[in-house]
Image: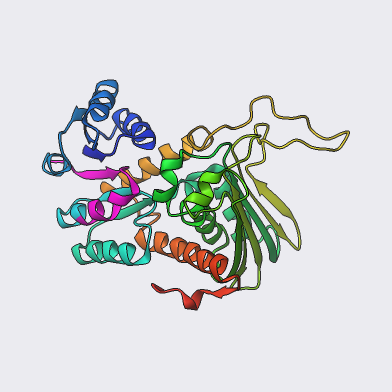
Amino acid sequence: MRIGLIGTGRIGSFHAGVLAHHPAVSSLVVADADAARAAQVAALTGATAAATTDEVLGAGVDAVVITSATSAHADLIARAARAGLPAFCEKPIALDLAGTLAALHEVERAGSVLQLGFMRRFDAGYAAARTAVRGGALGRLHTVRATTSDPAPPPAAYLPLSGGLFRDCLVHDFDILRWVTGREVTEVYATGSDAGPAMFRAAGDVDTAAALLTLDDGTLATATATRCNGAGYDVRMELAGEQDQIAVGLDDRTPLTSAEPQGPPAPAKPWQGFLERFAPAYEAELDTFLAVVRGEAANPCDGREALHALRIAEACELSRERRRPVRMTEIAGA
């Protein structure tokens, strides 16, 4: 297959390397708003650098991978749909519900394929947790605790473009909560703190956030996130039932130190970033996308799945702003 990739930043460069070495990919065409960066990635991967997005879409590609700046996602999704090309896109579709729904309308009207990049669905730990929960190994699930903690804040210029901590970061936890449990969120109560670096206050964002989510079967879930976790990159999910409890993301690299005298020691090499922690999952989601394009697999995460996660993030932002619980029925796009 001939694959087009649009956007050669950090995640785009990683995906380009995966695609360039995939046995199902015969050739790769890459483009970026920064032509020099696209040329550099092309040289490193053996791909062809295209001058523009139009050139990629017109290069006889069988599918496109969209890893551009978030602000361009919705437009590129729509253009791929109108060109009849299956598309893989990193989350989010757009930073608002209107833009998300408009892009989804284009995909559905064209009858094309859109797979969203929620890579945690392809992580071995989360997959095992899903099997345990849905197979009844934990008994009745009563509590879920999810956390995403970055070791250091992103550049200040990124914050106004990110959509905020709930949409940019915790949206992964909202998606994986639905995927693992098979339940829907009915109500949220969320808050956040901007007590850290001043750039968060300047951007109207928070550096730390917490949400209490009620699921449709009465299960209670908490989701917390921070941009300021100096110990390392910490992504975990704990699931507790009446019979047992399990944890995802608990290994010898989890940046967590026990305060107990006989507890495990501090990790020798704690996780430092998402590409390192989830590299196998990123590779697996692209492998699955290529199988989807070949007609050998069902789409594991279509655009409507991304919409569900975004609606939860929107409810959390409204809750933080209004300082009250928010029912999911208050959020458009259901």
Image quarter (top left, top right, bottom left or bottom right) of the C terminus? bottom left
Q: Is residue 295 visible?
A: no
Q: Is residue 21 visible?
A: yes
The one nearer the camera, 100 or 84, is: 100
Image quarter (top left, top right, bottom left or bottom right) of the N terminus? top left
Q: What x and y, as percent, mark residue 44?
A: 29, 21
Q: Is residue 76 magenta?
A: yes
The one nearer the camera, 27 or 314, is: 314
Where residue 227 sits, quadrant-wise, is top right
Q: Is residue 145 magenta?
A: no
What's the colour scheme? rainbow
Residue at the right extreme of this rendering: 261
The one nearer the camera, 155 or 209, is: 155
Q: In this view, does 294 lie to the left or right of 233?
A: left
Point 34% across, 49% down: residue = 70
* As drawn, 16 above or below 199: above
Where residue 256 sits, quadrant-wise, is top right
Q: What x and y, as percent, mark residue 158?
A: 42, 43
Q: Is residue 330 left or right of residue 320?
A: left
Q: Is residue 6 left or right of residue 216?
A: left
Residue at the bottom extreme of this rendering: 329
Chain part drawn in magenta? 60-78
Point 46% across, 38% down: residue = 155
Q: What x and y, as percent, mark residue 50?
A: 16, 33
